[in-house]
Amino acid sequence: MRARNYIVGAAFALLAAGMGHSALAEDIKIGEINSYSLLPAFTEPYRKGWQLAVEEINASGGINGKKLVVVSKDDGGKPADAQTAANELVSSEGVAMLTGTFLSNIGLAVSDFANQKKVFFLAAEPLTDAVTWAKGNKYTFRLRPSNYMQAAMLVEAASKLPAKRWATIAPNYEYGQSAVSVFKKLMSEKRPDIQWVDEQWPPQGKIDAGPVVQAVAQANPEAILNVTFGPDLVKLVREGNTRGLFKGREVVSFLTGEPEYLDPLKDETPEGWIVTGYPWYSIKTPEHDAFLKAYQAKYNDYPRLGSIVGYQTIKAAAAILAKAGSTDTDKMIAAAEGISMPSPFGEITFRKIDHQSTLGAFVGKTAQKDGKGVMVDAAYKKGADYLPGDAEVEKLRPKD
Amino acid sequence: MAFYVVQFLTGLASAASLFLVASGLSIIFGVTRIVNFAHGAFYMIGAYIAFTLTERFSGAFGFWGGVVAAALAVALIGVLVEMVLLRRIYHAPELFQLLGTFGLTLMVEDLVVLIWGPDDLVGRRAPGFKGAVDFFGQNIPSYDLFLIVLGPVVLGILWLLFQRTRWGVLVRAATQDRDMVAALGVNQKWLFTSVFAVGVFLAALGGALQIPRDAVHHAMDLRIIVEVFVVVVIGGLGSIVGAFVAAVLVSELNAFGILIFPKISIILVFLVMAVVLIVRPWGLFGKPEAAARKTPGLTVNPWRPLTSNERLASLAALVVAALLPLFAGNYALTVGSEIAIFVIFAVSLHFLMSVGGLASFGHAAYFGLGAYGVAFLAKLAGLPMIVCLLLGPLLGCMGAAVFGFFAVQLSGVYFAMLTLAFAQIVWSIAFQWVSVTGGDNGILGVWPASWAASPSHFYWLALGVAALVTIALRIAVFSPFGYALRATRDSVLRSEAVGIDAKRIQWTAFVIAGTTAGIGGALFAYLKGSVFPDNLGISLSVDALVMVLLGGVETVSGGVIGAIVYKALNIWLVSQTDLSKLVLGGFIVLIVVVFPKGIVGMLEVLAQRRRKSSPPGSSLLAKPIESAE
């Protein structure tokens, strides 16, 4: 039993060793958390994106002369571990703010942590509307266009389709559920004549695509809304192609135009789906050209949407810190509310009313080019145009 | 009508892929009794290697040759794993091999990303099976038809192999009674190795054949492993025909179930397993396990309460731990609280596993129920923290009382799998019942009251509860109840002969363990300020198993050390390295090889040896143990 003492001691020694770093006092530290080990397909380009941003910021003199340091942690895809990481970043690394997160439930967990500990949190990726609305709080801001915004962008195109019979396929968790319900609501408002004939809810990551495709085909819809992504999307598309599900049917699909999800499809890419995404090859604006050039020069690889999100998250954090001129949480909140800044997609603003940024997304159609999936006829949709009016937002969001 | 035929055929195709992987697992378990957690990892490596080979060599020969070559290559890896790792631990306590294969799985998940990159890979379609066949206006992919044929063909080949070859006779004999086979002079080493190779070959073949349908990615293993286990158990362990029937049953129920309940897939296999196990305790085609022939108590160090010196040492350790807030920062204290909570969780499972001999694969259910209990009381009823902490674990207690009643009717792996099924059912309720549980977005804002809010206060609270729970369970071990429980573990027949109501004793133990886990969960909810379905999930149940096995299942309080080492290491590695799974997996494999009795178990053996070389009085105790090794 003496051994127990040694082991307890060793365990705490290990812990203590983990807390040893301390950067120079004049550096500004940002804490960053993401699901690196669970979702490397998205988070690797994301990491490259924010690393590029850090390099650029420090090359041009840092934040008000101070060097920017990003301390990055993996949450393994678990909300509880994300909170452990957040706690480490805040308590022992002494970061000025938290950023990052991918999954909606992790975004909410960290946002709740931020609210409790009074820490500034800039959510990068989580799409759930709850982050800024139903469970929004004064400490949390979000960069990416939310579920609602992406649904609104897609509905704009989808409502012009003649199709009246619609079916939906979505992963059975919060993201899929809320994407479908917002899409249905907005769609039915614009087109009261629409019928929803079938819905399929495969478990996330475990779609048994054959039966799902058959079941949807059996309902004989004229159009399909798809919310699956990643490996599930691959299986769905392959089964759908072989079984002719998409022939003569319109398909509207969340996120499918993002290189992360479109590129693996290669010569199986279905033609003519209406999707949100990121056609980096056809964006011709000076802001994006500069980003693309810098990214390709540094990594010899093309950017994914994750790269944009990572890059802009850190750029936004730096802009907020520079404007606040301080790492005081209240000053950062004051600085962030209504701040405007450039981005590879053009100027964006973090709204004062709900802390949502007006970063938009590209809506276009899928096509095949030389055996690869691409987005064509893509147009940038500004986030600001797809958010509900202020009165409605105030109803959705609890008072601070 | 045509639609239903096609839907049936589609279900059959899904069943065929499931069966290939499941049959391999079933054979391995039947003969070696290894719960091969790495089976999914072999499936995944099969797919990755097949992807590389089929991309490089085009044409029909390249594709089919690549698929078979990949399966063979992975089988070779399997042989290597068996010879280097598993052979060393066949005689370790039951389920210890699970720990080793779990470590391997962790390593493989990082390795495939290192080797093949993070992107999802989409392989070629199978030459000759690219299109679909028209069936009264419905399309059936020709590759599905190929799989539908392949399933029964593999079943037939396996049947011939087992019924018509000498090797098959030996395998069947070993499945029935491996001690007897060994006594008859069969070289078990090579029998086990060859069986493992065949099982891994089937897993890898199953993975390689997914290339034309699926994307190859680094989470394929976890996606399939649990489902495959369930199929094997539904069919009856060691029964190939059973695995086939179970695969067809599950796949067809899913194919038709989604037509009526589109959300059924998430829970279907577990529902089927729970029903099958309650009605048929050994699966559809399984037979009751032969009674173990080992003499109870021989391999285990006789348990005894702590001596007064050891009590003082433990108390000193507790005092040292309680002094932590004097010199550690807030982060270390929060991590300390988390570790203390996991100590509670681990000792509760340890009590069930080592004292009761009942290994639960779904222990997180009661931990999570405790956490949800607190969240409901705090958020819906608005009760103060003390009341929530006292009443919250009752939800875990109630869950354990209901599920435990059914679970203790079974034993061994069937018991474990039924607990897993119950845990998954609870998980899916938490996941799906959005209006009450918040679904996967969880319940937020369950923060501690001001008296416990500071990290040091919460740490003392968690540490104090952990110490009380550990002491209480130790007292239970050495109480008459504890002795009765150990009697049911060591010999059901003898314990019944002396008048012990085994099922009632085990049920009580299950409720105690569940309630204790619920206490841990209740504290966890306040530590994190939120509750998510993750708190009930499989990975948390696996964590608990790993902690207990790491500490040593044949010890009285190994769970304490297992929890401290595993949790501290896990948190530290995740924070320090991007390859935390690789390092943690490697560490676990190393522990398995070096400490086949777990950390505490090994320390006890060392202590015994030292005592043996000192005064003669104590060596009397150590002798029978030495001779048993």
Image (cartoon, grey):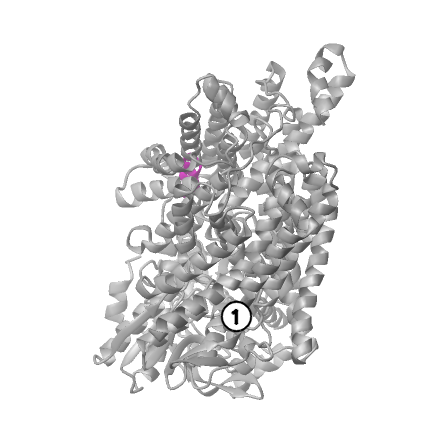
Q: Residue at x 32, y 67 (%)?
A: A353
Q: Foreground: A29 or B593?
A: B593
Determine the residue located farthest toward the top in the rendered image: B617
Label 1 amino acid?
Lys
Q: Residue at x 44, y 29 (%)?
A: B506
**Bounds of the magenta segment:** B518-527
Q: Main secondary structure of the magenta part?
A: helix
Q: Foreground: B589 or B377?
A: B589
Determine the residue located farthest toward the left in the rendered image: A192
Q: Secondary structure at mark 1?
A: helix
B74 relative position to B395: left or right: right
Q: Foreground: A57 or B439?
A: B439
Q: Vertically, is B415 above or below B262?
A: above
**Can the viewer see residue B475 in this picture?**
no
Quarter where residue A189 is shown: bottom left
Which residue bears the numbered disc 1? A315
User: What is the quadrant of the C terminus of chain B in the image?
Assistant: top right
Q: Vertically, is B601 above or below A103?
A: above
- Image position, residue A222 (x, y; %): 32, 82
**Can the viewer see residue B49 in this picture?**
yes
Q: Is residue B519 magenta?
A: yes
Mark 1 crowdedness (10 Å alpha carbons): few <14, some 14-19, many ≥20: many
